[in-house]
Every structure is written in C-alpha cells, then in structure tokens.
Amino acid sequence: MRRSAFRRSRGDAPFRFVSIAAGVFLLALMAAIGVFLVVRAVPALQANTSHFLTELTWQPNSAKPVFGIGALAFGTVVSSLLALVIATPVAVGVALFISHYAPRRLASVLGYVVDLLAAVPSVVYGLWGVTFLVPFMLGPSSFLNEYFGWIPLFGGDQVVGRNMLTASLVLAIMILPIIAAISREVFLQAPKMQEEAALALGATRWEMIRMSVLPFGRPGVISAAMLGLGRAMGETIAVALIFPATFNITLRILSPNGNSIAANIANGFGEATPIGTGALIASGLVLFLITLLVNMGARFVIARRKEYARAAA
Amino acid sequence: MTVQTGIHSISAARRAKDRFVQVLVYLSFALAVIPLLSVLWLVVGNGLKRFDLTFLTHSMRNIGATDPGGGAYHAIVGTLEQVLLASLIAVPIGLLTAVYLVEYGNGGRLSRIISFFVDVMTGVPSVVSGLFILAFWILILGMTYSGFAGALALSILMMPVVVRSAEEMLRLVPHELREASYALGVPKWRTIVKVVLPTAFTGIVTGVMLAVARVAGETAPLLLTVFITDSINTDPFDGPQMGLPLYVFDQAQRPTNTAIDRAWTGALTLILIVMLLNLVARLIAWWRSPAKRGS
C-alpha cells in the first residue's frame, strides 16, 4: 500500500539490499565463529591421546598430547556460580536502592557510579586483584578455614590468598553492574498503581516491595543473573592473573586451586605448539557453546518478559 | 476505628523488619562502591609514581623487568590505531544493521532472528572473538599477528553494542519526519540518509563512543591476535604491535617492583583514556538534550 504511494527510486533497492546484507553478515559471523573454531580444533582433538571431555590434565604440547576440558570446565562453572551467589543479592540490593530507596535527585547519579564499575577494564581488576586483594584475602580465608573448616567448601590444610574465593570475588565485582543495571530497569517498570495500592493499604515500604515489585521483577532478575553468569564464565584476564592455574577438581575454595577455560587460554597461549594452540581453540569452542546456551536462555526469558510488561502497561 | 489508627497501627515487628531491609539495601550499595573506590584509589596512588614524560614518550625496547624507566608509548599508539580500525569496521556494519532493523525489518521473521542474535552476540566472551580471528585470519588465511588482526577481534565485540545503541536512537526519530519526507516525494533511502540518520546523529555518536570505551580496555582478544612487543610499531598491518591493556597484563606478570609500577601507570593511562571517551560521550548526549526538549 504505502510503497505504491510514492515513486520507487533507483537507489532504494541497493540501499535496502546493503542494510539486509549487514544484518545477515552478523548472523553469518556468529555461525563462522563456531565453524572456524571447529575446523582448527579437530586436528588437535585427533592427536589427543585421552578423552577430551573427561581428562583432567592439560599437556597438549608434549610429544604425546594429553589434554581434557574436565578440570577447566569445572573451575569455570564453580568460580562463576560462586561469583553469582556473591553478586546477585548485592546487585538486587543496589537496584532496589536506586529504584526505590535513594532520593530521586541522587538516584541517576548513584546509578552512574555503579555503572562506572563496568567501565574499569578487566586487566585493571586483575592488577588490583593480584597486588591488593590476594594478600588482603589471606586473613578472611584463614578465618573461614579455622572456624568453618568443617564445611567441606572451606576445609583443607593449606590456605592461601590466591584461591578460588578471591577469583570469584573479583568476578562478582565485575558482573555486579550488569545484574544491577538490568534489575534496576525491571524494578522501575513495576506497576505504580500496585505499589501505591499496597502503600494505601498500610504496607510498609519493604512489604510493598515484597508484594508488588519483587514478584514483578523476578524473571528480569533471573535473566540478569544469567547474563552475569555468562560474563563471569567468559572473563579472562582478571582471573588469569589471579588463578594459581592448577588442573584438579576440588571444592576447597581456600586452597591454592583454581583455573578456568578462559584463564588457561590466556596463560597457555604464549608457549603453545600448533597442537597446543588447537587444544586451546577446542577449549574455547566449549566456552563459546556454554556461554551461548546461557545467553540464549537469558534472552528468551527477557523477550517473554518484554511482551508481558507491554501487556501489563 | 481501624481507619482512625491508620498509619500508626504498624506493629513494632513490621517496622523493625522494614528498617532492617532498609539497612541491608543501603549496605549493599556501600558494598558495591567500596571496590570501585579501592581500585581507583590504588590506580591513582600507584599510577602517579611513574606518570611522567618518559612513560608517555618511550617504549620498552631494551628495558628489562628490573630496569627503571621505560614507557608505554608503543602501547598507546597501538591501542589508538587498533580501536580506530575496529570502529571503522564495526560502525558501518552496526549502523546498517540498525537501519535494517528499524526501517526495513517491520518485525518480520528475519529481523526478529537478527535482533535476537545481536543480543546473544553481546555475550560472546572476548577471548572467543580473539580465538576466532586467530583461527580464521592468522592460522587459516596465514596472515601475521598484527594490530589489524586485533582490530578485527575488537570489531566483533563492538558490533552488537553499536547495533543496539543505534537502533534505540533511530526508534526515537519521530515518525512525522519520515512521513513529511515521503510526502515531498523523497525516496525511502534518501529519507533515511538525509533525514533519519542526521536527526539521530548525536545519539549514534554517543553510542559509538561508549562502544569504543568498552573495547579499548579489552586484553584477551589482543593477546591472541596482536601478540606482544616491546618496540614501537606504527604500522597496524604488519607485525606484532602492543596495546595498553596488553602492556598492563605483560608488566603485571613480571615480579619486580619497577615492572609493577609501570603496570599501575599503564592502568592509570588506560582508565584515563576510557573515562575520557565516556565523558566525551556524555557531553555529546548532554549537548543533544536541549534540542530534544525544544522539539
């Protein structure tokens, strides 16, 4: 209808084509990332003398390459989940503070301050982590080990600052801004009518938040946490500087243990042989697939939410 | 009777709970700000020690880990070139994709798929984009490690950010402007180029600057594509280069005080560059807002 209302120009079709091509290029790029990682990973996987998914050690550079994703995937998942457990409650608190507690005028400025946490480059967190947080965390780690050592998580005979807990803490700081920012947006969208109705019925501020804001925001917070999880798993340089780079599976987060897929790529790339590089690419492929799944899950939740929010408005 | 007591009828237990949660919420904000203050305090405090002219004008050539002196000139030059090249690649593609999503997509299936994957793409780990360029550009096509390879990896991280911000800005352009242009017989593509894009221009620039600030601090993709060098290399298309984030990473791994000092100063320089870009972006956004109020 509308198209026939004005004259077709000779430039229209090419311009439309170029803009579609740009969009399709992005899709192709995502596919290409997967394809080319597979292409370079296959030779190394064929040279592997062990099972890639279950093997713990990582010696792809030796004459008989032995390497597996087991310990690395375990470290990635555990450190990221730990970071998520630390960051989510604080991030929800920060989001509530900015959306419902802080004075209106200050709210946007304070929100910007929290966003600044995301503007600090990853390598700076790494430098801060090794020089300040690692020595600092020796105290709290020893305390946890001494008094809560009966919990397997905090057990172990050797306690150091450079451990899984410290790395998770740095990851938590790095993913806090994204979780806080999305939760804040969702909390601000909570129906004002319901909030006012709750207050009019005599609810305290917390009761109002518990009854109208949190139930409305829950799916948003969940997807924000999943996006944070994806970030934490892909985070490289900060944890590469902090992890002691071991290849074992243990839940003792205060002992000198810990590594992740991404950190291993950064630390192992320098001295990798061609097979070693292929092995690192194979581990990167696993990381790509895991983060892809987590992110797609989060985006599905958000996309559903958007329609719901629009319908409710 | 209940009406009369109204607000005063809140029991002590409920009030205490309300207070308790309020304290928790304030505390969580304080908890979030403490690391930021700690990082900035240490970066400024330790970084100023070596923040001198030598640092800004010299490279690390022939300077060992224990030697004093040395600088990050080669890294600063590298970072600026890599980020500029990454923008030159990512901005046109991102902008055109945003134009497609807003002007041509009409909520069709293809535009919904692209929109979804742009969101997913923002979550691609930076190290994976570096591995992809390493696998495709360097190992399969046989190119050398170079600043340009790093720029390619950074551009992958920039694209989704540019698409999202540009899309948001294009959607803000009032539909009346487009219709007025169509009514005058201007074809759609010229309407987009001459009316829609100029109207959204400052907003798009802000988004691009924020995207640039985001990738300027990325280390992992550079590590895999640019490699590390101590010498000045101003040609981003040939041979290993350095980047400021890489410089910090490299120095931080050397266990001497002089190297750690250089790492802090590099971190300070990097944060200053990123903050400057953020500030410029905010200034452009601020400069734009009076015009929005006027219309």
Image (cartoon, rainbow, N blue to C red):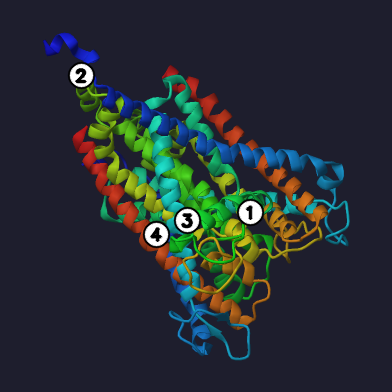
On the same chain: label 1 and label 3? yes
**Circles 3 and 2: CB atoms closer than 8 Å:** no
Q: Residues within 10 Å of mark 1 (few under 14, many from 20)?
A: some
Distance of mark 3 from mark 2, alpha carbons?
Answer: 46 Å
On the same chain: label 1 and label 2? yes
Q: Amino acid at mark 2?
A: Ala
Instruction: Give the residue at x 68% y 60%.
Output: B147
Q: Amino acid at mark 3?
A: Phe
Distance of mark 2 from mark 4, alpha carbons?
Answer: 52 Å
Q: Which residue is mark 3?
A: A148
Q: Amino acid at mark 4?
A: Val
On the same chain: label 1 and label 4? yes
| Marking on residue A134 | 1
Q: Which residue is mark 2?
A: A200
Distance of mark 3 from mark 4, alpha carbons?
Answer: 54 Å
Judged from the image, the secondary structure of the residue bearing numbered disc 1 is: helix
Q: Residues within 10 Å of mark 2 (few under 14, many from 20)?
A: few
Judged from the image, the secondary structure of the residue bearing numbered disc 2 is: helix
Q: Residues within 10 Å of mark 4 (few under 14, many from 20)?
A: some
Query: Percent from the top left, x then y, of residue B278?
Result: 59, 37
